[in-house]
Image: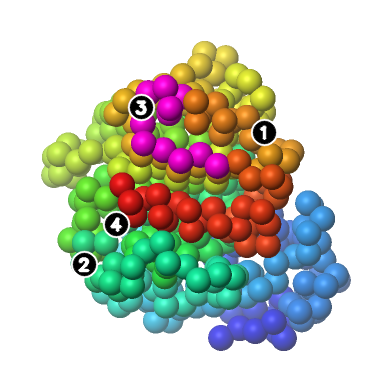
Amino acid sequence: MFTLNQSYEEILSEEPVGRAVGNLFPSCWMQRITPPHAQDAMCYIAETVRLESGIPFPAEGFVESANLLMETYEKQRFCFVPLWKKQPGGWIPRADLNSEEGVYLFTGNPGVDNYAFAHTFGKGSVPPYESNAVSDEKRKKTLMRPAVVICPGGGYHMLSSYSEGIQLAQRMERDGGYKAFILNYRMLPNLYPLPQMDLAMAVMHIRLHAAEYGIDPEKVIVLGASAGGHLCASEAFLHDCLKKEVLSLLTGKRREEYQKISARPDGVGLLYPVISFLTEYHEGSYLNLTGGREELRDKLSVEFHISGDYPPTYAFANADDGCVPASNTIRLDKALEKAGVLHLCEIFPSGDHGIGLGYTLSCRKWSENMLAFFENI
């Protein structure tokens, strides 16, 4: 197991960390470690290197991601499940493929440790309070668990796969009794509808293989942060047309199997989501998803497409969010209320953006509130 006492260079020298750790930890964050720091211990890097946002380099997250990758490589506790193109067993993709070949679900290997996120978690995902939204009995179930597909944010140009992926998966499996899947979806220069098709395909794949994964095919929720939240919220009303797009690319028995499967999620969870492309919107997400096509502004502004059959929804935002204004979540709340959709939308006083579980902030209990919301419907 890697530790904070090892150097960045030493960790990267291990196969397959150097070529693949970017699947679990953002490569753009790793680029902040310049050659003069490459031989420094990770604990020293945490003190001296900062991300573009100004926060210290998350060295513990990098080390944990490298260890999870080694668990995948050496023990097959996790697996990368390709969604569009068949790959050999034990396949570990090169990081940042951003193509059809690189669309996958990262999850516990059902043949080795189906709930590996719950069993190999770092301390960063453990809440600083007793989590009791879900009973011990449901947390320990091994069959017919609910499933969650997690879509990290990143403005449709990168994926915050650790804090908005791995840590959420650990929390959902350990404390919520879910079977968690992290989706690596396509981004810029891949435009709409490709990312939404990737999510639709993920939902259908999980339902098709429900018995293998030990999940309830009628309890598949999607959980997304920021632009990943927009991905989840938009797929939830576009699922029928997205399924048609997916089926148009499949042939033979595979097409026949998926023809019978719904792409509609059974619930939607959103962290500080992008909702609108018209009012107080996140311009980067709009441009990166649409390429600036004006005709897609209305079509992909979620608040205009909420109807009575929209899935039950939980969402939260922070009032001081300087990236994606909290008004996005407020507009979503009003649209859900008007349509009579079961929902809970929360606005917390502070915390800004991109904070994941946010345990040190005013939104520290959002994940507990979300678990309770979905548990009680």
The span from disc 4 to disc 3 (Cα, nearest Å) is 24 Å
The type of residue carrying mark 3 is Gly
> Residue 192 or 36: which is nearer the viewer?
192
Which residue sits at x=28%, y=38%? 263
Q: Who comes first in sequence, dot 3 or dot 1?
A: 1
Secondary element at tag 1? loop
The span from disc 4 to disc 1 (Cα, nearest Å) is 31 Å
Which residue sits at x=50%, y=26%? 334
Q: Who comes first in sequence, dot 2 or dot 1?
A: 2
The type of residue carrying mark 1 is Pro
Where is residue 72 shown, x and y percent of the image?
A: 43, 74
**Residue 145 appears left or right of 254:** right
Residue 340, numbered label: 3
Within 10 Å of disc 3 (Cα), the crowding (few <14, some 14-19, many 20+) is some
Disc 1: which residue: 325
**Magenta residue span:** 335-346
Q: Who comes first in sequence, dot 3 or dot 2?
A: 2
| Residue 202 at least partly seen | no
Q: Who comes first in sequence, dot 4 or dot 3?
A: 4
Within 10 Å of disc 2 (Cα), the crowding (few <14, some 14-19, many 20+) is some
Which residue sits at x=82%, y=66%? 49
